[in-house]
Amino acid sequence: MNPHAAYLDPILTRHGRQVVNLMQILREAQEHYGWLHPDAIDYLAEQLAVPRAKIEGMASFYAFFYLEPRGKYRVLFSDNITDRMLGNVELMNRMCRNLWIEPGKTSEDGLVSVDFTSCTGMCDQGPAILVNNIPITRLTESRVDAICDLIREQVPLAQWPAEFFQVVDNIQRKDMLLTEGFVPGSALQAALARGPQGMLAEVKASGLRGRGGAGFTTAIKWESCRNAPGEVHYVVCNADEGEPGTFKDRVLLNSYADKVFEGMTLCGYVIGAKQGFLYLRGEYRYLLEHLNRVLERRRQQNLLGTGILGKPGFDFDIEIHLGAGAYVCGEESALIESLEGKRGTPRNRPPFPVTHGYLDQPTVVNNVETFAATCHIALNGGAWFAGIGTEKSTGTKIMSVSGDCARPGIYEYPFGVSVRQILEDCGATNTQAVQVSGPSGVTVSRQEFDRILGFEDIGTAGAFMVFDDSRDMFEVARNFVHFFAHESCGFCTPCRVGTSLLRNLMDKLHNGLGSPYDLAEIEKLNKLLLSMSHCGLGHTACNPVLDTIAKFRPAYDARMLHQDFTPAFDLDWSLQAARQMTGRDDSGAHLSTVEEQNP
Amino acid sequence: MSKTFTLDGKTIPFKDGQTIIQAALEAGYYIPHLCYHPEFKPHGSCKLCTVKVNGRQTASCTMLAAEGQVVESETPELNEERRALTQMLFVEGNHFCPSCEKSGDCQLQATAYHLGMMSTHYDHFFPNRPLDASHPDFLLDFNRCILCSLCVRASRDVDGKNVFALAGRGIKTRLIVNAKSGRLADTDFAATDKAASVCPVGVILPKRRGFAVPIGQRTFDKQPIDAYVDNRMVREEG
Ligand code: SF4
Ligand code: SF4
Ligand code: FES
């Protein structure tokens, strides 16, 4: 008898022993043990009749699955640039010093591990960490010290002070989506009165475009999926909000979940789907119980399940699928792969998900905010919606504002608002740049603050990170480049190798060893990533560097050692460990130069 | 009348359902490629086979041929980018050709020659990848793995075994075998498997057969890779 069977059997049963549920099975299995024991993998492989290499291959793709023991307390520091600006590195060093551990390693007694992770979506209340996947916000030195005490005394997480775990919505400006008073079921009633075709016509008339960044017209997606032949159709809500600096879905799911689920149900009605999935990013694990409660209530209200609102044949239900730390799963075909319990590798397209999505069936994948918006279209009609915003960008957009400003948080505006307006509203002063739409978006400089948000100018998924004059825009770009190298899925050559090469070049510049040659190399890499990469991650990985080179050139020039060629290899730097070990501290050892170059 | 598209100005016939690279190779025109193999479902990951279709770059091993497409392949621009990809593959792993049993039969090496690659250009990563010599008949030298997944596909789709799988993510992506110990000897891999002969580089190597064919008389010593055109011929010779 496998020693892991006792806790794995109920999990397997709950998931119908289906391989497509492998990711959820692994997540629950891991919640039991803190990591995935090789014997547990053996048991799962045998029970699910899959090769164990498939399970290992899948698990090792995701940052939050552990194939080796981790600490009983697993601390992950969010490492977005906004966390950096709030001093996360110093706080992490403090924690490691307190606990006598090295970053990335587990303490010898197996008690604790501390590491970095990509942006956890708490930029308006950072610096943030995850402890065993539960967020703690507004970290300070004293909070760090308190956490270290709790860990050393092995206090169970449930008994830690509640205020540590407080995540606030921080809504600063409301428009249609964030206005309270939505009555669950009201949008469905309106849609039922219109019929599926009628509802589709309203979505068409509304001009609604996807809120995830790409801006694809929603009605076209719904219509192609509706018309695509298939045994079953699926609705998928993309809540894998991984773009650093974006946290609006967190708020929508926390306080407006009914709108999101109702929008998904509307879509199911229009395209004839019976099953919906909400793909929730692993970082938002803490919202799972809340969301399941909302789903349960909606079932009781006959807003989900069979014969919704008394209409025979209108059957639809929603399941939540939790991600496990992979930014690339925000790409819709990678998300579907992940939903099927596989590595989150973007598929070869065409075919597109609208015809061949989940389990190869026609599938609509839309963003959280897009679904929420469809409720308002059902309630007030497409023409009304189209009257808001601009001609090409109808409706409103929720912005996640963070960085150097007095009032970070959530701001909803009709499309067409200028960057300057948002900066004024959030109380930003001496702003030198705004990163709109995260690392894959654009760096907007002071001269461009009159540009507007909208598909005709700056398309956006909603991140708005503010940098004042005290910030070094080179370091901003370098943080983003590290992010892409960390999150590349590794499938295609240009992105797998290219993002790491780019990271090394930026580190070379950071170390003060740059030359114009490196800038030329960066341009070449950019061209290659853009033309050869498999998906959007590779296509956009160079954006922040190119933007900052173009707009903040002095930040790069300051790092040039020579005006011509400089090798990446530095003799003194390479010899420093040896020199320190042999106790050399004479001036010929150049230890001080090395330290200056590598802070 | 069969349907056609043009490749660098030449007319290429194709059957419905064929990809651009399939039709091109069948018609005798070489497009560089590494992860494509005519016997397997395309993977589309190495991106060496990228061509311009009606002005847009796309992998020709996954793109279906369509009537009237205008395809460009042998352009200086595309070949320069392919060369850069090849260089990336070289620096990502540890490729020391002079001491490699596959030298001369290796598609990565042959493609590099074809593309006129004179140096690896980028800084080497020098990854630390241990060897697996556990199996009595075969050796795995992961240092040379280009993650093309051909062995994964061959073992799964032809041998019905799933001996190999890709693991990890990003630059840490690696090949693993289907055993708790992580050793090839503990899998059901056999020398007669399709997966044993499919590796385009020098990872999956038979033991006790080193340098049986002298350097100078090997597949790509006889003629360059583009002269073989149809991939199958390379396999049979090599
Ligand atoms: S696998 Fe090919 S490229 Fe790599 S070392 Fe061997 S011969 Fe050279
Ligand atoms: S071992 Fe060979 S066939 Fe398998 S993925 Fe690596 S390079 Fe490809
Ligand atoms: S041969 Fe087409 S991507 Fe590798």
Image (spheres, rainbow, N blue to C red):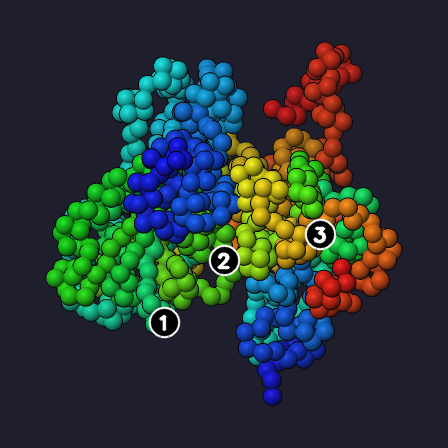
Residue B51 location (% of width, % of height): 64, 65
**Same chain check for tags 3 and 2:** no
Quadrant location, the N terminus of chain A: top left
Residue B122 location (% of width, % of height): 72, 44
**Crowding near the residue tagged with mark 3, few <14, some 14–19, many ≥20 C-alpha atoms within 10 Å:** many
Residue A98 location (% of width, % of height): 46, 15
Q: Is residue A231 above or below residue B35?
A: below
Residue B67 location (% of width, % of height): 57, 79
Task: Give the number of the disc on residue B201.
Answer: 3
Q: Nearer the viewer, residue B161 or A368?
A: B161
Q: Which residue is mark 2?
A: A347
**Crowding near the residue tagged with mark 1, few <14, some 14–19, many ≥20 C-alpha atoms within 10 Å:** few
Mark 3 belongs to which amino acid? Val
Please tell me whether mark 2 sits on a helix, a strand or a loop: loop
Marks 1 and 3: in contact by CB < 8 Å? Answer: no
CB at disc 1 and ligand 3 closer than 8 Å: no
Instruction: Estimate the spatial distance between the alpha carbons at disc 3 and disc 1, rounded to whole Å.
Output: 42 Å
CB at disc 3 and ligand 1 closer than 8 Å: yes
Q: Nearer the viewer, residue A56 or B193?
A: B193
Instruction: Estimate the spatial distance between the alpha carbons at disc 3 and disc 2, rounded to whole Å.
Output: 25 Å
Marked residue chain, label 3: B
**Crowding near the residue tagged with mark 2, few <14, some 14–19, many ≥20 C-alpha atoms within 10 Å:** many
Task: Give the number of the disc on residue A229.
Answer: 1
In this view, the mark in front (3 or 1): 3
Which residue is drawn at the image coordinates 81% and 43% (left, top)? B99
Q: Say whether disc 2 or disc 1 marks the residue closer to the N-terminus.
A: 1
Q: Is residue B26 visible?
A: yes
Q: Is residue A194 left or right of residue A449?
A: left
Which residue is drawn at the image coordinates 20% and 69% (left, top)? A195
